[in-house]
Image (cartoon, helix red, strand yellow):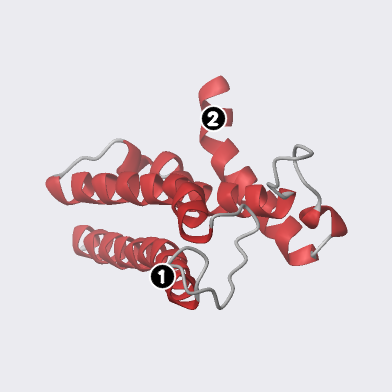
Amino acid sequence: MIRTWLRILPLLLLIGSGILLLEGLPILTEPVIEGMGLPFGTLIAWVGISMFPCSILIGIRLIRKPTSQVYRFYKGAFFVFTLLGVAWGGISYLLTDNWTYTFSTAETFRGSERTFNIFLIYTSFVISITLLTFVIFGIHHFIINQKHKR
């Protein structure tokens, strides 16, 4: 029973964070801890970006317990994507020098327009590579199942 909940938890966190971010509630701009400067919205986005690949890694049995070399590759890929998602918050902080991830036209590297582009590319990469690999996994699995039915 506990194992089932542990497999479902990343998916629930992903769905929950998506709903909260889409709602655009005022609490998203409130700090998690007063004086730290980390808003709830940043923390919720961080959880969502981390849980997207994690929910696939833990939730799909063929990836969690691979039966072939190809599925071992998928497991490794989603593990790396999970690590990239977990690192997203820290890397974003290093790029912006603040937890609200605001950028300016500063001459320095941190928080500049150049780091904004890096931030967008990194964020887009983590989400899109996870989605693309998941779609490829789905197509691959469908083709394998069709071959076995013949």
40, above or below 114, in the image: above
Crowding at mark 1 (Cα within 10 Å: few <14, some 14-19, many 20+): few
Eye-nearest disc, 2 or 1: 1
Q: Which amino acid is tagged 1? A: Ile
Q: In percent of the image, x 56 and y 78: which residue is there?
A: 105
Q: Quadrant of the N terminus?
A: top right
Q: Which amino acid is tagged 2? A: Leu
Q: Nearer the viewer, residue 92 or 78?
A: 92
The residue pinned by badge 2 equals: 6
Q: Nearer the viewer, residue 46 or 91?
A: 91
x then y, percent, for residue 67 = 20, 40
Residue 121 falls in image quadrant: bottom left
Q: CA separation, marks 2 and 1?
A: 33 Å
The residue pinned by badge 1 equals: 118
Crowding at mark 2 (Cα within 10 Å: few <14, some 14-19, many 20+): few
Q: In percent of the image, x 43 and y 47: which residue is there?
A: 87
